[in-house]
Amino acid sequence: MPWFPRLPLFPRLAGLLLALACLAATPAWAVREVRGVKFADSSPLAGQVLQLNGVGVRVKVIVDVYAAGLYLPRKDTSAANIFDMHGPKSMHIVLLRDLTGEDFADAMVKGFRKNNSDSDNAKYLPRIEAIRDTMLTFGSVKKGTSIHIDFVPGAGTRALIGGVQKGNDIPGEDFYAALLKIWLGNHPVDTSLKEDLLGGAP
């Protein structure tokens, strides 16, 4: 009978225990999931790794519209601090129903106007029109489509759909802060979503 070397039981058992320990050490929060949409705990942007601050769902009446995750250079539960925070930032949005670029554009303009002063609305008018024009190019957007609204230092606000940039970068970190007020301002598009994006449980 041919002879095959056999590993001692202890090294094999030790290897199994080590593998199990590695699995147990994998952080449970590496991915957050809401309404079946998964958000990674971190996301790279502009040479920096952003942290997932919170995730939630935009609900209109009783209809789930989209899932959203807010990525920041560091986590913070204060909307005021986030508005003042420097560096790259990103809103990740995944549609939970079919929408159009016009739906997005109209909702964004309405939310922006509600959450910014008359003087700021006048100040940002050309840039609001620019991002509205960008969103109109989205056309028909199907359920499951991902939309990123990023702030890239040195470039500006950038909109991507399915990973492809739409329109031109819109300059100004102050503009991106004003844009975030749509979700985090005093009159947010969804109060529960605001709480979740600020670190609450979805």
Image (cartoon, rainbow, N blue to C red):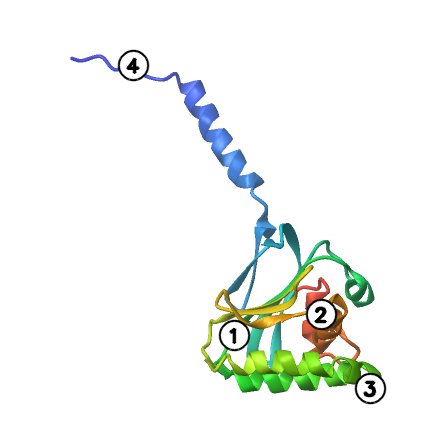
Looking at the image, which residue is at 71% across and 62% down?
199
Which element type, helix, strand or loop, lies under badge 2?
helix
Looking at the image, which residue is at 73% across and 79% down?
188
Which element type, helix, strand or loop, lies under badge 3?
helix
| Residue occupied by mark 2 | 176
Inspect the image, locate mark 1, and give the three-letter code of the amino acid beneath it.
Leu
What number is the disc on residue 118? 3
- Residue 189 showing in the rendered view: no
Q: Quadrant of residue 184?
A: bottom right
Cα separation between marks 3 and 2: 17 Å
The numbered mark, 2 or 1, whose residue comes first in the sequence reads 1
The numbered mark, 3 or 2, whose residue comes first in the sequence reads 3
Q: Quadrant of residue 151?
A: bottom right
* Position of residue 62 measured from the top left corner of the image (x, y, whole percent): 58, 84
Cα separation between marks 4 and 3: 81 Å
Inspect the image, locate mark 3, and give the three-letter code of the amino acid beneath it.
Asp
Cα separation between marks 2 and 4: 65 Å
Which numbered mark, 4 or 3, is in the foreground of this view?
3
Q: Which is nearer the eye, 52 or 119?
A: 119
Cα separation between marks 3 and 1: 31 Å
| Residue occupied by mark 4 | 5
Q: Which is nearer the eye, 99 or 173?
A: 173
| Residue occupied by mark 1 | 95
The numbered mark, 1 or 4, whose residue comes first in the sequence reads 4
